[in-house]
Amino acid sequence: MVVNYFPDLVQTIYRKMKIIYIANARFPTEKAHGIQIAKMCEAFTEAGNEVELVLPRRFNPIKEDPFEYYGIKRNFKITRLPCLDLIILDKYIGHLGLWVESFTFLTPVFFYTLFKKADIFYTRNALLLPLALFKRNLFFEAHTFPKKYFLYSLFLKRTPRLIVITQKLKDIFAERGADPEKILVAPDGVDLEKFDIKETKEECRARLSLAQDKKIVLYTGHLYPWKGVQTLAEASQFLPEDVKVYFVGGTTKDREEFAMRNAQFKIKVMGHRPHSEIPYWLKAADVLVLPNSAKEDISKYWTSPMKLFEYMTSSRPIVASDLPSFREVLSEKNSILAEADNPEKLAAGIKKALDNPELSKSITEKAFLDVKQYTWEERARKISDRFF
């Protein structure tokens, strides 16, 4: 009977949405944003929508098929548009290459989408916000607060929906004039099936050729200063002799510079590894560390790192900097929190996890229970239910 009384409502609820996700990104990429874009396109499709990912045609040293590279279902379409890619010359021309690439990509995007029909146009790139001038159904997903907000405020007022990854980001957008009712806080997510692997620590170490008789403290991700990796490197000097600190991730240049700068410490800098290998690194470790710095707002307030949720899924104790951004997900019940930018306090937190197996077991189990609300599927569903 409900269908007879409310046919338009029922049709709206069950209608497949056409989503065009526009990403100004090299794809695939070794950087985390590529994983996030891939997983969200997959999850939006799994939620019953039709998804097209629009990308620039850029130079890419990674030649693998994107679906195979990210280990995702081939359930959405990828379209590549031309641009003038000068980013490869950034060593010589700096940020000019990014600006040229961005604006020469925006032009074909404008013409491509001008006559394209879609229920939703979706992007996480602030430089694509001018599309809101003629696409009133452009949704924007913010991972930071734009440094020159005044350049984007007009376009943001025309976007019907704003998705942010932390509560602090919502607060600052609202303080600057955005309607709080159109802002949704949706932290990043994780693929539970991919990271909840059944192999033991010993099996993972054998697979990765790691020593069985050492305690392994692990950080995964890029080596940017705001990630706090220098604090973790310095913390290694306060750890017992049988503890080894591993860093997995970073570009070749960053890895070489970081290793050289910290040659005096007992650390191993492994560089970038395929994302499909990361679950085995996490399970091979004794402690997982998020040493983010409190010196920059992107770290203190805005970040929602995917590795946080990957850590929570891996059944290993987490030691993290005590930051407002992490406090939105972590607490003393599911992690050990340490003062940011303090190597001795970070080392103390790591030793606490190593020396207290009952505590580690308790926070590990709580983290695994908590992370179930942070899957990519749940994130896509949350956005869909609230905004679509």
Image (cartoon, rainbow, N blue to C red):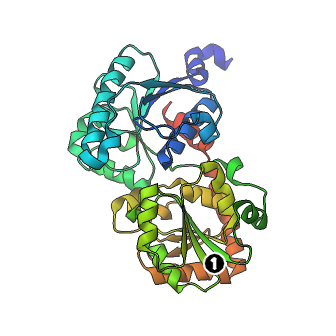
Q: Element type at marker 1?
A: helix
Residue 223 in sight in this render: no
Extreme left residue here?
Answer: 150
> Residue at left 47%, top 71%?
322
Q: Is residue 22 above or below residue 218?
A: above
Check the image and report above or below for 25 versus 82: below
Q: Is residue 71 visible?
A: yes
Instruction: Give the quadrant of residue 358.
Output: bottom right
Query: What amino acid is found at the position of numbered circle 1 in the picture?
Result: Ala
Q: In x, y percent, where is residue 299?
A: 40, 61
Residue at the image position 52 percent from the left and 74 percent from the top: 337
What residue is shown with label 1? 353
Based on the displayed image, in which of its 4 quarters is residue 226 positioned? Answer: bottom left
Which residue shows up at 27% across the image and 35% down it? 100
Residue at image x 34%, y 28%?
Answer: 83
The image shows residue 239 at horizontal and vertical percentages of 56, 84
Decide: few, some or many residues near mark 1? Use Cα within 10 Å; few <14, some 14-19, many ≥20.
many
